Image (spheres, rainbow, N blue to C red):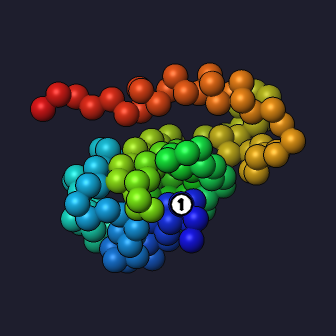
Amino acid sequence: MSDIEKAITLFEGITARDPALATKYLDPERYVEHNPYARDGVEGVKQYVEELATDRAELKVIRAYQDGAYVFTQADGHVQGDGTFFDVFRFEDGLIVEHWAFSAEAGPPNKSGHTQVDGPTKPDPGEDTREEQVAGAGLLPVLSYRRPS
């Protein structure tokens, strides 16, 4: 199973309200959660999923990409309100060890007619992406930053 599929399994667990499925590929010893609505660790994710039991939870992954140890996803759906969700997962030894969650309320198309989720959903293997990778590499230290305890 690919790392992308493992990340999507977390969303499937949220949609099914199944804490065991949502946490299936989380490292039980090293997992760090940055979602502002969930406590840290695997138990925090389980509690988060259990608390969604009375709320409608639906997520459809629109696009998912991987670059090294990081998987990036964009999803559309309803979790504590309609929205667009952008998640970053960091993997080590085949398990998710860290997760960042960002969301925005679902909105209408912009002045150009584009929505938050339209556009290509698969990378074009013919594109020269090295320049984009180098430009994006500057973001990784920002994503990995942790406040001192």
Q: Quadrant of the N terminus?
A: bottom right
Q: Position of residue 55 (x, y in %)?
A: 38, 67
User: Which residue appears at 58% of the width and 65% of the height?
Assistant: 2
Q: Which residue is the extreme one toward the left?
A: 149
Picture quadrant of residue 28: bottom left
Residue bearing mark 1: 3
Residue 145 in percent (x, y) is at: 33, 29
Closest to the observer, 72 or 109? 72
Residue ID at (66%, 55%) = 62
Q: Amino acid at mark 1?
A: Asp
* Along the viewing direction, whichever of 29 and 106 lies nearer the viewer: 29
Q: Is residue 40 left or right of residue 141?
A: left
| Image point (80%, 28%), residue name | 112
Q: Is disc 1 surrounded by few (<14), some (14 to 19) or many (20+) residues within 10 Å? A: many
* Residue sitting farthest toward the front: 93
Residue 133 falls left or right of residue 139:
right
